[in-house]
Image (spheres, helix red, strand yellow):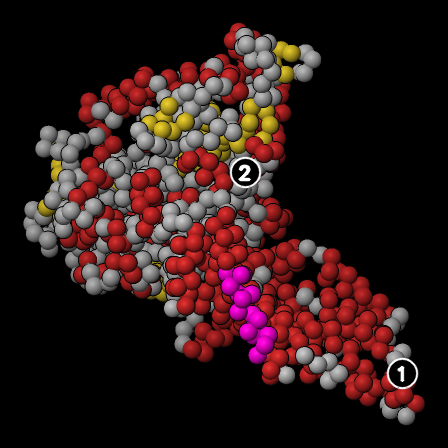
Amino acid sequence: MWKTILRRVLIMIPQIIILSILVFMLAKAMPGDPFTGSIGPNTDPKQIVALKRAAGLYDPWYQQYWHWIVNLFHGNLGESYTLKQPVTAVLGNRISNTIWLSLLTLIISYAVAIPLGMTAGRYEGSRRDRGIVIFNFITFGVPTFVVFLLGLFLFGYQLGWFPTTGTISADASGFIGEALSRLNHMILPAILAGILGTTSTIQYLRSEIIDSKSQDYVRTARAKGVPTNKVYSRHIFRNSLLPIAAFAGFQITGLIGGSIIVETVFSYPGMGQLFVSSITSRDYSVVTAIVLFTGILALLGSLLSDIIMSIVDPRIRIE
Amino acid sequence: MKKSTKYVMGFVTTAALFSAVLAGCGNKSATKTTDATVGNLKVSYTNNAKTVKNGTLNVAMVQDTPFQGIFASELSNDAADSYLAEPGTAVGGSIFKTNSQFKIVNGGAADIKLDKNAKTATITLHKNLKWSDGKAVTAKDLEFAYEIVANPAYGSQRYTDSLANIEGLAEFHNGKAKSISGISYPKGQNGNQLKIQFKKMTPGMWQSGSGYYLESVEPYHYLKDVKPSKLVSSKQVRQQPLSYGPYKVSKVVSGQSVTYVQNPYYYGSKPKLKQITMSVVSTSSIAAALKAKKYDIAYEAPSTAYPSVKALKDYVQTGQKSLTFSYIAFNLGHYDTKKSINVMDRKTPLQNKSLRQAMGYAMNVDAVNKKFNNGLATRANSTIVPVFDKYNDKSVKGYPLNIKKANSLLNKAGFKWDSKHQYRLNTNGKAFKLVYLARSGSANSEAVAQNYIQQWKKIGVHVTLYHDRLTDFNTWGQIMTNGNNQNWDFTGGNWSVASDPSQMDLYSKGAPYNFGHFTTAKLTKLLNDIDSTKAIDSKVRQQAFYKYQQYMQDQAAVIPTSFSLDWYPVNKRVVGWTNDHANDQSRWANLAVSASSTK
């Protein structure tokens, strides 16, 4: 297995090189540049040209690419053109915001989805099952931004239970005070996003449990007199987790991707919002860094999923 | 936001539209407002109730992205940063006091004396002006702002040809000189006077925001040890900036909020609030946030939220004429990059001014503003924004909707109707089609563009969209700044202009931002007249502006479409709120509240 993992990691090197070239060229192919938004009667076009030249934007693409790659190997992702800060500082700030929010969202999502999925599968056709299926249709069908806005309006503004904007209160102080304030700011978006994110997990789990119920090994367990609860918790549940495990690697890497909608509605500065705004403002250095970073994580996620699968189901081997 | 000169992109999300549903009505209040209005908005809100001590004020910065947070105007080009810096400086960030039309008057953090014969400006700092660390603001601090702008190592975007009118600044910028020869210190570097030597004097110099000199000041003692290339990302201008205004920054949560407390060294009367917190709020939730009374004032609230917020009885709708106007520009030539001039040489039916005028008269701008801007924009009569009341020529009427007149103009000019195709023919009898380069950006952009295309169809002018769709801002900007793209016939855009009304940078023969490339000898003369030394006499300048606007109207060089209003909802507990630019220096120091929490 270790040999396989090493081989997969080595294969990733040319994949990452190709990815980096594609990312760089696609970013440069976008119309406009980071200074397009600055044009105006009091901004001298000559000054814009000088700044573009200083930033190397007039160099041939391969020179720009080489410069970027060399800096990358030195841990320097460049400067953000619009935020005027080192990209590493910008990403560092946003990634931590996004990871904490996504982690809480994921925990809430699984905490809600697994019991519901199991219940629906176990009591297929019952009122409970129908209720859960309807819940699933609602979470699948309703536009997410409507839910976020209604949640914000009801629990944030009307009832005043949760903060309504940002990641931390302006008056929070001290380590514990700031940590609690951050947690408080995450609860509402995480609950709403977590509940909306249950759809696929519930559906997969329900289908798998229904399938597993009629499998031979279940029949055997029942014939041996294993109590029903134990049949579900020991035999069916573990086997039904396979499709969820297959996605787990991607979901963990997806933690840093962020969500543009939840971040915009709650004015929560995270990666999703940064990615979209950097594309809009043609902030090449940030765009390429994010795409490359998420691309690498996607490759790692795929590997991680395979490893998780092999742990969950010993019959699966990575060779 | 008087110093900002950039395109107004105006993103309005679908979510912002939804937010209108979320707000409702509140409680009644008996406080009064003053009579001065712009559109449906009050310029000032007078609350005579007794103020409370140690009050706090919550301000919403309405935007969907975190703010940049650069507290040095020389290095920032973000509108939000300018607003966020106001309590620590002044409205607009200028050290000079102005009247309502941005003419500089004495009485601010600094006074300026211009000598047209000697071609100098002498800036004198207020004798008690101090930074929030207690150190005096000095002449060197004034000069340091020029160093930041002109030294390329700082990476500022603010260096312009207008500033190069200062003796020695260009040499300093190019690295040929180590100091700026045209800047001197009559009372020494630690004194309170700075003298600037110009190459020539222009009438705009008497206006704030003219761009011929800087109106900001930076703490040299605090920033001098920061490496120039690192200044923009340093904690000194992002987390712990010094200020000279009534309040000083006590905490910055990066991209999210700024908290101000009183500056004990403020040169003016003691500020009245204990704390001010300015926080980012999304466009989609601002109406609900105001309904829940979370904020006292909202900056940059989208016009889509206006109907909901207007219904809130606890808020007064205040505003001011904005420095923004929108326009339609016709592609009549190209920009010669070698000679740096506009050449009006394109073969297009639009060279006929009757066609341009007719297209203006066919536009139903009032209906569009009513439907999509909720009254926060009015039809423009010229390209001189009405905040410059003295220079905006009221006799120039612009192009009010008049289909009959438009048809008459086209008939007289020889654009005959082709009943077979239901469109008009060119004056040479051939069918023609115009390509409209319309920008995307707002949820309403498509509807507005299609509406105008229908209007032009009514007068027989066949218009299609560039590549049959709207064009995103970056592509549009690339086409415009290229200056040689001949695949479009006319476009729409907005300018947020400087607080000097001169339009040399927008429509002169050499202006790269003259996107339509309309240029004639007469226009050059009229623009030169506005900026001539004779026009230092404001009456001469007024007449020059009038003639310019009359000529632009007659030629339909561009079609001015709308003037915008800046809208600020203000909670009724706020005391001392005014949008009158005459109070820009003292607005924040005078603000107070009449209740301990938002009503």
Residue on which disc 1 sits: A216
**A17 falls in the magenta region:** yes
Residue B586 appears in the picture as rendered: no
Q: Residue placed farthest to the left in the image? A: B187
The residue lying toward the viewer, choosing from A205 and B339, is: B339
SS for dot 1: helix
Q: Is residue B422 above or below residue A149?
A: above
- Could you tell me what secondary structure mostly forms the magenta stretch? helix
The reply to whether the C-beta atoms of the residues labelled 2 and 1 are less than 8 Å apart is: no
Q: Chain of mark 2?
A: B
Residue B332 appears in the picture as rendered: yes
Quadrant in the picture for residue A121: bottom right
Residue on which disc 2 sits: B471
Q: Chain of mark 1?
A: A
Q: Residue at x 58, y 34 (%)?
A: B467
Residue type, mark 2 in image: Thr
**A173 falls in the magenta region:** no
- Horizontally, is B440 left or right of A194 in the view? left
The residue lying toward the viewer, choosing from A69 and B535, is: A69
- Horizontally, is B206 left or right of A248 in the view? left
